[in-house]
């Protein structure tokens, strides 16, 4: 019996699937009769996510080939652009949420840095005032004649 299913390719943690017509008794990634398209689940930006040769798919299904559940979903998505648009809109919404969250975290971090800097500045100012006050007191003590000096002057 011929099955239309996905055959995995790609590197570790970077999957890439071929949509293939193969004998149902063969292993998932082994030889296949014909490659009907591909599916790239990690496509970004301008990369093509899904391609299906609809003519060859129709031929194999007319010959009695059974499609897997996932391939049925992918073919449905490929044929109906509104499903694709919904998926893209969902991905864009998720990306916007992530961007907003990162912006909020950056703003909070900047606020904390400003507060910490203000605290350090206030401490430095307080230390300067304390040092100036102590210097003024020592200067006053040096300038003021002591009682012994006053008695000697008289």
Image (spheres, grey):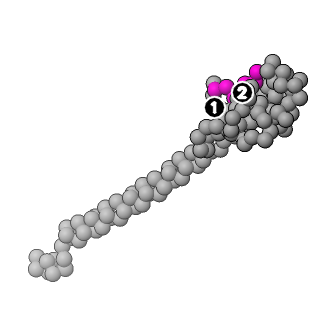
Residue 123 has which mark? none
Q: Which residues are magenta?
A: 47-54
Task: Check disc 2: other Cα within 10 Å, few if <14, some if 14-19, many if 20+.
Answer: some
Residue drawn at x 57%, y 45% as measured from the top left: 106
110 versus 1 height, above or below: below
Q: Where's residue 68, x and y in %? A: 83, 37
Q: How far is the residue under mark 1 from the one under mark 2?
A: 23 Å
Q: Which residue is mark 2?
A: 35
The part of the image, by quadrant, that contains residue 79 is: top right
Residue drawn at x 73%, y 26% as measured from the top left: 34
Q: Is residue 28 visible?
A: yes
Report the number of discs. 2
Residue 63 relative to residue 105: left or right: right
The part of the image, by quadrant, that contains residue 82 is: top right
Residue 42 relative to residue 148: left or right: right
Of labels 1 and 2, earlier in sequence is 2
The part of the image, by quadrant, that contains residue 38 is: top right
> Which numbered disc, 1 or 2, marks the residue closer to the eye?
2
**Residue in front for this viewpoint, 97 or 144:** 97
Q: Secondary structure at mark 1?
A: loop
Task: Check disc 1: other Cα within 10 Å, few if <14, some if 14-19, many if 20+.
Answer: few
Q: Is residue 51 magenta?
A: yes
Residue drawn at x 80%, y 39% as measured from the top left: 24
Q: Where's residue 139, x and y in %? A: 23, 66
The quarter in which the N terminus is drawn is: top right
Q: Where's residue 15, x and y in %? A: 65, 39
Q: Is residue 39 visible?
A: no
Q: Which residue is mark 1?
A: 44
């Amino acid at each position: 019996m011929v099955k239309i299913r996905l055959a995995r390719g790609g590197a570790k943690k970077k999957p890439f699937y071929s949509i293939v017509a193969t004998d149902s008794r063969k292993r998932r990634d082994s030889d296949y009769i014909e490659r009907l398209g591909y599916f790239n689940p990690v496509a970004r930006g301008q990369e093509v996510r899904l391609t299906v040769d609809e003519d060859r798919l129709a031929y194999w299904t007319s010959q009695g080939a059974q499609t897997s559940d996932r391939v049925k979903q992918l073919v449905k998505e490929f044929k109906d652009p509104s499903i694709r648009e919904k998926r893209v809109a969902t991905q864009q919404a998720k990306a916007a949420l992530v961007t907003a969250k990162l912006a909020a975290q950056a703003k909070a971090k900047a606020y904390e840095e400003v507060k910490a800097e203000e605290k350090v500045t206030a401490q430095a100012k307080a230390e300067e005032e304390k040092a100036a006050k102590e210097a003024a007191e020592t200067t006053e003590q040096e300038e003021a004649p002591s009682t012994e000096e006053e008695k000697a002057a008289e």
